[in-house]
Image (spheres, rainbow, N blue to C red):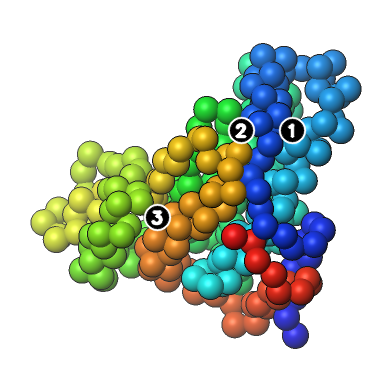
Amino acid sequence: MAQLLTCPGPMRPFAGFSPEAVTFLRNLKRNNRPEWFQPRKEQYEKLIKVPMLDLACCLGREFARFAPDYVTPPDRSVFRIYRDEHFSYAKKPYKTHMAAVFARRGVEHLRGPCLYFHFTDKELIALGGVYSPERDELLAYRNLIAEHYCELREILADPRLVRVAGELQGETLSRTPQGFCPNHPAARLLRHKQWYLVSILNVKLLTTPRLLPELSRSFEAMAPFVAFMSRAFPQRAKAKRLAFAVAPGTCH
């Protein structure tokens, strides 16, 4: 039986965030303290939290077309605004970027690549791939790349992907990692410690109905690369597919 994906409120066209939401983030950056935020918490929920959940749900409907394993309940994909109190930067308790991550279902310990986006009052980016792999994960990715590097190169050379995200990003080692031949045809790819693609979008999209289709376009272009990297960690056989708990509708 499919697990139901419950979306916040009825499905409707996503119109973008209001200009007031961008202003709120700009003001939060200047007033990052509880005495400013707490009296405005209701404003934050109305301007940012609820629309963010709506956007995550609409993206889930888009993923159902080209990345169904990454459909994620909105309340699990959208990050909280509160920073970890033990690691808060300069003791600032609130994040000034809004973000959501969509991890592959059916993989132990959330291993594998993800789809991610975030925005601030000045930046809007979409990312797909492997950003923070554990040490033991690195070997799995490198083994996959060493064996199927021709396929990966073909994916990365796709003109549609290059237009959207350019070249592969990520930190690299200065030398080929131990256990792999320095003369391997994929030596440059094997030196990576991260493998991800980034699409930098016009921040002005935030307040327009074009936000959803542009994010979806970026993620759809990245989907073959993400699907390739996901093969390093097979899914559990009994993973449940998510279905929507609302009537079919349009989110474009």
Is there any visible trace of residue 136 in the rendered image?
no
Which amino acid, by three-letter code, is at mark 1? Tyr
Q: Which of 6 and 153 lies nearest the eye of the viewer?
A: 6
Whether pointer 1 and pointer 2 mark residues with C-beta atoms closer than 8 Å, the reply is no
Image point 59% across, 49% down: which residue? 209
Tag 2: amino acid? His
Q: Secondary structure at mark 1?
A: loop
> Alpha-carbon neighbours of circle 1 within 10 Å: few (<14), some, or many (≥20)?
few
Disc ID at residue 138: 3
Residue drawn at (40%, 55%), measured in percent from left and top?
A: 138
Q: Is residue 245 visible?
A: yes
Q: Residue at x 21, y 43 (%)?
A: 175
The residue tagged 2 is: 97
Q: Earlier in the sequence, mark 2 or mark 3?
A: 2
Residue at the location (23% across, 39% down)?
A: 174
Does residue 141 lie above or below 83 as drawn? Answer: below
Number of the label disc, if any, that sits on residue 82: 1
Seen from the viewer's position, the closer of residues 57 and 109 is: 57
Q: Position of residue 219 (x, y in %)?
A: 47, 57
